[in-house]
Amino acid sequence: MKPNLERRLIDYIMNNKNRFYLLAYSYTHNEQDALDIVQDSIRKALEHLDSLHGESQMKSWFYQIVVRTSIDFLRKHKRTSVVEDQVLETLMTAQMDTYTDLDLQVALHQLPTIYREVIILRFFEDMKIEDISHVLNSNINTVKARLYKALKILKIELQDEEGASLNG
């Protein structure tokens, strides 16, 4: 194992730990489970550092580990949990990109996971389509299709919410 690469990986993880936590939390909706996923992801990354092909790939490589670990966790535990809007808003305030639109948060969490993850990676993590494709181990066209579908669903949900607010 290359000690310099390991040091850079650790620095990268420490500098972005809140982002990884929020990504894991977006899957589990549970603070402790998200922390466990991040910790397990770090362990996996350090164990498999030799599979990292260049420092330029570090971001997408580690995001891929976090996403896969989150999905594995969900499969293993096969459960869903509901998050209070206030808890979600509190967690989101730690992020630089804060969103106070509760309708958006609710609509985002109602999306199926395959759509929610592309939205989170693209807009909250500011990843390129190619990087998302790598992280999710999906074809670029599949990612584009899911992103388009997710945005379409969100638009409908948010228009419905706006209409309900105006009529209600």
Image (cartoon, helix red, strand yellow):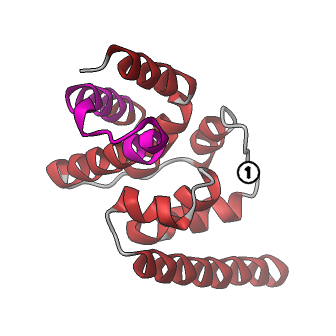
Specify the quadrant that holds the C terminus.
bottom right
Q: In this view, does 48 lie above or below 102?
A: above
> Is 89 inside the magenta-drawn segment?
no
Q: In this view, does 95 lie to the left or right of 7?
A: right
Residue 7 in the image: above or below residue 33: above
In this picture, residue 164 sits left or right of residue 10:
right
Vertical relation: 43 (above or below) 73: above
For residue 123, what is the image quadrant?
bottom right
Residue 117 in view (yes/no): no
Total numbered labels: 1
Determine the residue positioned at 52% across, 83% down.
149
Residue 84 spot, x, y in % from top left: 54, 47
Identity, as a three-letter code, of the amino acid under mark 1: Tyr
The outermost residue toward the right is 166
What residue appears at the point 63 percent right and 79 percent down from the top-left corner? 157
At a point 43% along the width and 20% down the height, the residue shown is 10
Asked where in the image residue 78 lies, by quadrant, the reply is bottom left
Dot 1 lies on which element? Answer: loop
Depth check: 49 or 154 in front?
49
What is the magenta range? 35-63
Magenta: main secondary structure:
helix
Can you identify the residue that label 1 sits on? 99
Quarter of the image for the N terminus: give it.
top left
Other residues around mark 1 within 10 Å, as few (<14) / some (14–19) / many (≥20): few
Q: Is residue 144 visible?
A: yes
Closer to the camera, 148 or 110?
Answer: 148
56 in magenta: yes
